[in-house]
Amino acid sequence: MSSKLFTTRQGTILLGVAAAALAAIALLVYLREYRNSVNSKNQAISVLVAKSLIQQGTPGDVVGSTDLYQVSSIPKSQVKTGAFVDPQTLTGQVATTDIYPGQQLTTADFAVGSGNALTQKLSATQRAVVVPLDSPSQVGGQLDAGDHVDVWVLLNLQAANGNTRPLVREVLQNMTVMTAGTNGGNVTLRATPKQAGELIFASQNAKIWLVLRPTVGSTTTKPPVVTTNDLLGLPPLKIGGSR
């Protein structure tokens, strides 16, 4: 039977058709695999890219919590080995070299920082300032690192007639707690240089209270002023144009 298949004209045609069919199937399989390979290489992956210059020594905590980076979609074939995809993974890291705008952030550019120094949590324009407080003033010792607070100041305002009036005013909002005592004591806040000066002045000339903000959903509002008139239901005092 097989010998007739090779010797007859019909058999030769059938063999040719079968060979052509096998070749077509092989070609289709190859094209599909090639297409899948190309699609895989062109698949976009979201990675962290420097938005501005990240100087050597910049803490990863600062990079991950500020606008020093942006998330960009890059073809898989162009993603560098060790590229960061989650800003949280930068925590505890320090840049070991200058990283320029548009450059992908990779594990080769960072190393584990030494210890838990406050400097690893400060950007170039931020400062750590310590405010001495008693327990009630720091939310009963319930503050933790990473909490956000508003700063209220209690002081006596001297009027033009020489009389003094006590008032409470919110002077700073949404400040980040870096460290805090467990039951009164020092609280370290992250601040700008101007805010640091305001906190130092207030700690020496007034009474400071910290008010805890919710973890999510809080908004910045116009800083209020509270006086005796507010407690007595009288018209509010006009203080420096705040009311």
Image: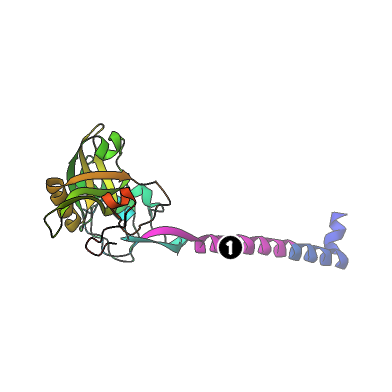
Left or right of 145 on screen, residue 32: right
Kind of element beneath mark 1: helix
Dot 1 amino acid type: Tyr
- For the point 34% across and 51% down, the residue is 233
Q: Nearer the viewer, residue 176 or 116?
A: 176
Asked whether residue 46 is drawn in magenta, I would say yes
Asked whether residue 82 is drawn in magenta, I would say no
Give how far across and how far down residue 88 sits, in percent: 37, 48
In the figure, residue 2 lies in which quadrant? Answer: bottom right
Give how far across and how far down residue 29 sits, in percent: 66, 60
Classify mark 1: residues with Cα within 10 Å, few (<14), some (14-19) or many (20+): few
- For the point 76% across and 63% down, the residue is 21
Q: Nearer the viewer, residue 119 or 178?
A: 178
In the figure, residue 197 lies in which quadrant? Answer: bottom left
- Name the image quarter holding the N terminus: bottom right
Q: Is residue 227 visible?
A: no
Which residue, given by chain and number where applicable, does mark 1 sit on? 34
Range of residues picked out in magenta: 22-49
Q: Is residue 84 visible?
A: yes
In the figure, residue 63 lies in which quadrant? Answer: bottom left
